Amino acid sequence: MSQAEAQTLLDQAEKHLNNKTMLFKKSPEYDKAADCFQKAAQIFRSPTVKAFDKAISALERAAQAHASNGVHFSAATALENAGNILRDSKEPAKAADMYKRAMELYQRCNNVEKACDSLLKAAKAVADVDVDRAIGLYLEAIELLVSEERHIFVGDTWRNCLALMIRNARLDDAVKLLERMFPIFEKLEQPEYLRKAQLSVVVIKLTQSDVGAAGQACDAYGDFALSAEGGAARELIEAFEAGDADKVKAVASEQTFTLLENQVARLAGKLRDICLSQEEDLTGARG
């Protein structure tokens, strides 16, 4: 395989796009053109050629041909493949743009799962370089699934989003996400996930040294106060209020907390130090 072979395929694709009938009326052969563009892309991206920019261009042309032919799924797949090349070429922003274009085409053919998958790929592509954009893409994926009554598929999406938020100290956003998940867990009849999410809010509020808000959350979540998680939350808050750092550590080390989402469990593991720091600040203020 060589660039010359790929160029021949591109030339053939153009001929198919400019095909004319016996009466010289233009009659594009979009399916044949798309096939040529995709074969050219395969050559351009092959280990022996590695002309990645040309591969991306060929895939975009293939997507255009497929879309013109009304085959939006194949058009989306071509753009998704172009996004993969950009991702592997360490161009995350451009990769995310390409995945977003693929998502829009998947939506046009009512393939919600593939549309969501493209959004997740876009979010992961930019997670290390543009946190705000990544969070926005994750949230868009969640809302897409919810709007299409695909609540059952939200799991990995909200977890990845929550982890990203906490890793980047976007704790207020994390609380909003968790509270957004409450009605979804209720709809899915997953009370154990609901209680864990409610407890996670308490942990985050305490991480922010906002004991009052943590207590208000406990009171606002109805039956949560009657659950094991609610009891653990109240015990933790009382230890915080008493400035008892050792008790905070003991409570936060219980399985109720260690079984929370990883990033939240790590926050719980740091609560003793936060309690100590808070108590030192109060002692200093009294002095």
Image: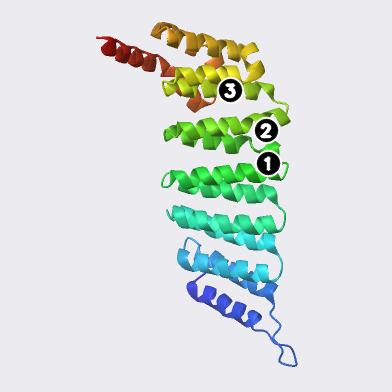
Earlier residue among tags 2 and 3:
2
Where residue 278 appears, as percent x and y from the top left, is 35, 15
Mark 2 falls on what kind of element? Answer: helix
Where residue 39 appears, as percent x and y from the top left, is 59, 68
Which residue has dot 3 on it? 198
Where residue 200 appears, as percent x and y from the top left, is 54, 23
The residue closer to the viewer here, 115 or 58, is: 115
Which residue has dot 1 on it? 146
> Taking 128 as reference, is 250 above or below it?
above
In the rendered structure, which amino acid carries the disc numbered 2?
Ile
Q: Residue furthest right?
A: 22
Work out whether residue 144 can be spotted: yes
In the rendered structure, which amino acid carries the disc numbered 1?
Val
Mark 3 falls on what kind of element? Answer: helix
For disc 3, the neighbor class at 10 Å (few under 14, some 14 to 19, many from 20) is many
Earlier residue among tags 1 and 2:
1
> Taking 240 as reference, is 126 above or below it?
below
The colour style of the image is rainbow
For the residues labelled 1 and 2, say whether their Cβ atoms are less than 8 Å apart.
Answer: yes
Which residue has dot 2 on it? 184
Viewport quadrant of the C terminus:
top left
In the rendered structure, which amino acid carries the disc numbered 3?
Gln
Q: Residue at x 42, y 6 (%)?
A: 242
Q: Is residue 39 left or right of residue 92?
A: right
Query: Where is residue 240, by image quadrant?
Result: top left
> Taking 37 as reference, is 72 above or below it?
above
